[in-house]
Amino acid sequence: MKWVPAILVIVLALAALYVALSGISALTGVQFFDAGGGGIDAGGPEDRLLPPSFMPGSASRFLLGTNAESQDLWTLIQSAAQFSFGTAALAILLALAAGVPAGLAAGFAGGWIDRAIMRLASWHEPFPPLLSALLADGAIRAALLPADYFRHIMLILAVCIAFGRWHQFARPVRDAVSQVRFQPYVDAARLMALTPSQIAMDHILPNVLTPVQVLLLPAFAFAAMDESALSFMGAGAPAVAPSLGSLLRTAALQMGSGWWLWLFPALALTVPLLAVNAVSAWTQDRRRA
Amino acid sequence: MIKLLLRYTLSRLFQAVPVMIVASLLAFAITAAANPEPQGSSMAERYAGYVFAALGGSFGTSEKLSASVGAEVMQRLPASLELAIVAFVLSLAIGVPAGLAAALRGRQRSGQAVMALATLVSSVPVIVSGTLLLYILAFKLRWFPLRLPGTGAGEACLFLPAITLAAFQAAQSMRLLRDGIERTLESSFIRFARSRGLPRFQIVRHAVANALVPVVTAAVSQTGSMLALLVVAETIFQWPGAGAMFASAAAAGDAPVLAALLLITAVVFLAVSIVSGVLSFALDPRIRRAHGAGGDMP
């Protein structure tokens, strides 16, 4: 039984690497997995719904089999993972870009600015992030032509997910700022005639980074879950440029045509999320120790 | 006392007004953005018309559903409520014994296994665990009627969405209960009870009674996450509730339905928060004092 944790660590580390590379690929366009340019392989009509090539009796040349459109599941999952984890990463960047300045402004300015921003946050907080994202996505879809909507689908989904989660960064940042704002060393900096922006950058921001760092990995995992849930419900990615959520949707709709249609997208979504959660738990333990 | 309670309730209702104004502006913006032609009337007039119609329970008609939005939502809400209540009861029925087992047998195999299971359940996405349950229990074993996502054909089944929701909630409440019991068992009054030689089951009874309070509080405050899960679970298992309607309205870009659901969820959240606020105001003298009401203490 001693080797079980070691294997688990290796699997989780590989999965975490896979998430990171997928996210980077999606955001920069650099491909890591596929020398052929990252496209989705497809066979002819005779290659429909082939089982994975490692199954006994399978004559398939496709490692993880094919779907009902004869597409190779291996490359399909890679591009879907890039979409899902790339959207999640972009969403977290956007949530940071909205939440951190809002929290800094509230904590630093105090007074009515603080009250206004935190009142907005406290109205938004009980509303679950997934429903905020679903609502925003539906509203944007209703307002745009389908072609425009799908051309910017990744950015739109990321904006919607970030909209659901901005307050998760704003409140801890604001609380951290208002805790240190009246510390003696900040008063000292003020007496030294440093400008407010210098005080904010050099004396307050460093104290804010710790709560943000703690939140980043769990927030990423939740954002990836949001994206896959939206796409599963048909509210996110289109069938032609799939996310892991829409692959699972297709597998559920075509239940019975092949277990591999469900199993591999499910693993590609779940194992990386387990890895991210494990890494985040591990870093928190180390921080505490 | 009654007068104080009334005044507190009124102030909470008054505070809800700006929230509803913002929610109604957002809802109107959703419908206006989807349907921008002004038809000779100004934005303010259209907004006023929308709000007055909504106050009368009318949210317009959906072209995609070809039905009145208000009637459709009202027809679907009971199913969602049924699912939520069954899932809530199931989650306590699973979570409380599991939390007890994890707290009292934490060093034994069974306690460790319960904890590992809870960690697994809360890290696997619902769309994965839900479709797995659907595949094994409904498609392969045929223990439950099968209703494929997106088709709506076949008989709807309450158990599968309820157990999916309940498992997720149970994992949260069992962890809270375990932490609560462990913290209470270390407190001084338990040490006192132990040194007095009380039997173990009486000590455990004290610890559990103390640890249940945060579980119930958290269960109420988890309404939000429950609602999000409800939408996903109703979609996976094709439960004919308002949650599945929410998802398909977003997928179809059906603005009147989305706007109506935004307003209705806002009202639900405000109502839950006001009711729980008033209840704790009535039950807890410390909260009354915090509101400057004096209270019963000298």
Image (cartoon, grey):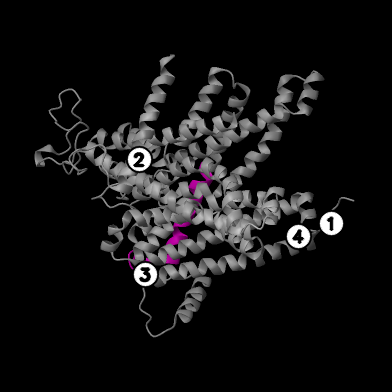
Q: Tag 3, which chain?
A: B
Report the amino acid beneath label 3. Answer: Ala
Q: Residue at x 39, y 39 (%)?
A: B130
Judge by depth and name the residue closer to the eye, A284 or B259. Answer: A284
SS assignment at label 3: helix
Furthest-top residue in this view: A1
Which one is nearer the viewer's eye here, B261 or A142? A142
Label 4, secondary structure: give it.
helix
Q: Residue at x 51, y 76 (%)?
A: B52
Kind of residue indicated by mark 1: Gly
Residue pointed to by mark 3: B34
Residue A43 or residue B3, whichever sits in front: A43
Residue sitting at x 36%, y 75%: B36
Above or below, comparing residue B23 to residue A263 in the picture = below
Pick whichever of labels 2 and 3 is earlier in the sequence: 3
Chain of the residue on which disc 4 is drawn: B
Of the 4 image quadrants, the one containing the N terminus of chain A is top left
Specify the label residue B294 is tagged with. 1
Residue indicated by mark 4: B5
